[in-house]
Image: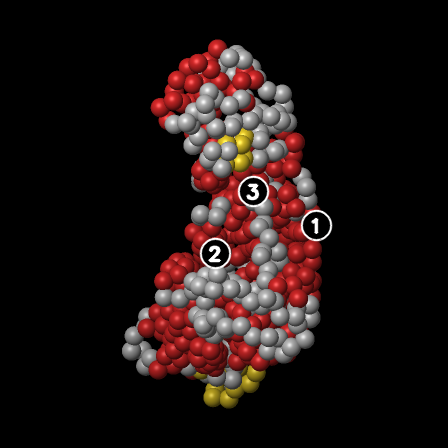
Amino acid sequence: MSGGGGGGGDDDDDDDDDDDDVGDNGSGGNSLIRLSTIVRVDEQKVYHAARVSHAWRRVLQRLEGRTPVLVTDVVLERSVLSLRDVKDDSMRLCCSKKAETDPLQSGLENGVSKNSMGKNIEKFGLYQIITFTFSSIPLLLTAGFTLSYVFTAGEVKYRCLVPECEHSGNTTFAPPWINASAPKIDGIISGCTRYTVRDDVSGTCSEASFTNNTHDCDSWIYDPDERTILNEWGFACDANRWKLTLVGTIQNTGQFVGLIFAGYISDRYGRRTFLTLATFLSGISGLIHSFSVNYWMFLAFEFLDATMAAGIYSAGFILGMETAGVKNRIFGSTIMCCMFAIGEILLGLIASWLRSWRTLLRVVYGPGLLAILLPLVIPESIRWLLSKGKHEEVEKIYRKMARMNGLPVTDEAINAFKELNVAKPENKSDLVIADERKPIVQVLHSSVILIRLLVCSFCWLTNTFVYYGLSLNSVAFAGDKYINFMLVAVVEIPAYCLAWVLTDHIGRKPTLSGAFLLSGAFCLAIQFVPAGAWSYGPLLLYMAGKLCITMAFATVYIYTVELFPTTLRHSLLGICSMTGRVGSILSPQTPLLAQIMPSLPLILFGSMGIVAGALSLIFPETLGTKLPDTVWEAENIGKSNETREIPGLPTPPRRRSSAER
């Protein structure tokens, strides 16, 4: 074939030839089509290879009515095109004349490319909705597991018992003479000191029965409508306040210890296995916790509850993110974060309804026993299964998903499903491979990274300290403590949404710094609201402060990852996270500061927020930049590209620019 016109005639003449003639030259043509070793090849590539030559019509006619499953080594000398796609593991023998359609054409019409197939697999169908929903339930429970001590070890209204006027077994919380029985502090009747009773009083008392002399109380009458460990074991007055605040510190210390083991168990036995086991054991521990017979037993099980529940949130979050897929990952992560806030709201509602610490623990931890059913409704982590070589289980998961979402069950679809869940190896530069120094040595040799680490650690400390501090102190704020707790939790939902939008539009730096500064400003501004001027003013400022610190909390995670190089990222993120845990351990002690000065906790929260906001201005903007691989790249984030030599390391060859080529 010397041209396009002669090609058609040759095709017609060759129709009667044997099949082997397909591999011969056409009459007068110089296009060579050689079909030799029989192995599988991508049909679309074969079609394209034949089409671009003058012999494309002849090739398609030769293959018509057959199933050319195995074709390879297609060489079209005229178009200078060579295709070699050998897949030995799928080698089969070839032709079947029973096929009524041309597989090359059906491959074009019905075949789906890897990209489009991946998009179909990632679509949020019925399977994803069910899995995502059940993965989110443990996240709701973790809010109760983590913050139930706010109510179990919370304050209860109490007053001094006046034995001259009443009997502890037959009295009311507010008798007629209550206002004259004790001095008032900031308009509130003291619960730790009372006035003495006149000597001539016997039996019934009145407001005139008390003198101006005071003495400390030795027994108390508690509000009968609420029951916490305060009135269970008599922790009234400032001398026993530390026993209440210690509960929160023990809770966060237990989480600190539990996270050490959670990662190992999750990596060894699987995310779903850990999620099921941790939630179930937390449920058992919490139920035993509710039957505590003394304070020290209560404290011991508070620690055990926290230790067992420490990794539930992260395991559920990972499973939820894998279910959401890459396209929906940001939206899915926002929903997952909001689940914790919803759990806080439910905790406040349940506590306000029950008002009994034993019943509250049973209601909060009881549903954890149902976690034993989780393996029936959610799959194991696909990435974890692939990392362990459990491909059969991955295929079972895909077949179940395909059945529920109406997806094709083919080898190509299963392989595409696996590829979507395989962690892609990072392309490390020569400097990353060459720099084998220990992380601490690399940090100490870079003043920029060292300062960045110190500031970042302080930001994490401030985040956890202020975030948990505002949640805890909301119950001590003016007004109904249950409503205050729920309102402070509600503002977290818009905070997560705002953080999601702002970090991708105005950048990480202004979002983080602005959130810190505004949080500090709102906390400090509460002190300047005149007493009685506007009853809801302090509460609105308090909620605004919680909203801003939640935005900072959501931003600092992604920002920390982007600030440090690949060689140090995991280690330095761990240092920042551990520092942040110290803040959550210290935050339950802030109510003790109120004994010195009622506004001192808020002043501390505001000051730390403003300092963190100012210090975070030294961070470079990372929006739109690639993750740094080396210390030098991390130091120069946002700066013009330069090269330099690192002492003691081999310098990689400089890549030539396009102009130099």
Residue 37: % across, % down? 62, 26
Quarter of the image with the N terminus is top left
Q: Residue at x 41, y 59 (%)?
A: 500
Cα gap from disc 2 to disc 1, whole angstroms: 26 Å
Q: Earlier in the sequence, mark 1 or mark 3?
A: 1
The reply to whether the C-beta atoms of the residues labelled 2 and 1 are less than 8 Å apart is no
- Disc 3, SS: helix
- Disc 2, SS: helix
Q: Which residue is mark 1?
A: 268
Q: Is residue 60 left or right of residue 384?
A: left
- For residue 313, which quarter of the picture? bottom right
Q: Identity of the amino acid at label 1? A: Arg
Cα gap from disc 3 to disc 2, whole angstroms: 27 Å
Viewer can see residue 178: no
Q: Earlier in the sequence, mark 3 or mark 2?
A: 2
Q: Which residue is mark 3?
A: 419
Frontmost of labels 1 and 3 is 3
Residue 417: % across, % down? 54, 38
Q: Which residue is mark 2?
A: 337
Q: Is residue 432 left or right of residue 462?
A: right
Q: Residue at x 35, y 69 (%)?
A: 540
Foreground pick, 545 / 128: 128
